[in-house]
Image (cartoon, helix red, strand yellow):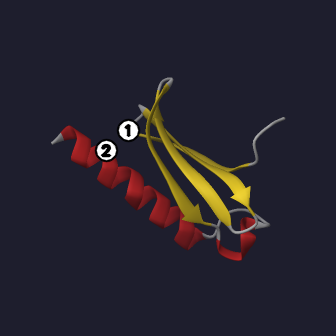
Amino acid sequence: MQPNIVWTSTLDGQYVLTITRIDDYIGELTLSEGDLVLHREVVGLSYGAIFGPDVADVSEWQRIAVEFVDGRKS
């Protein structure tokens, strides 16, 4: 069964950020580098992301990913 991927993006050409639906209004953020999962976190899906993710959610997910990667580099 294919997971319900709501959104995915690449950060710094190296990290893959994926949001997978786990319930109507809840998703799981996964930040990976290759096959290695670096970070997982439960996140909200505004309006259930019925027609795609809300722009405010995307901004929040990007913030989480950037903070994690920047913290890892320091």
* Amino acid type at image mark 2: Val
Write the residue at 48% across / 59% down: 61
Residue 69 circle label: 2
Q: Residue 69 appears at what percent x and percent y?
A: 31, 44
Q: Residue at x 72, y 66 (%)?
A: 49
State if disc 2 and disc 1 touch (CB < 8 Å). Answer: yes
Secondary structure at numbered mark 1: loop
Reading the image, the residue beneath label 1 is 12
Whether residue 7 is situated above or below residue 1 in the rendered picture? below
Residue at left offset 52%, top offset 44%: 30
Quarter where residue 58 is shown: bottom right
Q: Residues within 10 Å of mark 2 (few under 14, many from 20)?
A: some
- Residue 19, percent across and down? 61, 51
Q: CA distance from mark 1 to mark 2?
A: 10 Å
Side of 36 where 18 appears, left or right: right
Q: Secondary structure at mark 2?
A: helix
- Nearer to us in this view, 40 or 11: 40
Q: Farthest residue toward the right?
A: 1
In the image, what residue type sits under mark 1? Answer: Asp
The C terminus sits in image quarter: top left
User: Sequence order check: which comes first, mark 1 or mark 2?
Assistant: 1
Q: Which mark is residue 58?
A: none
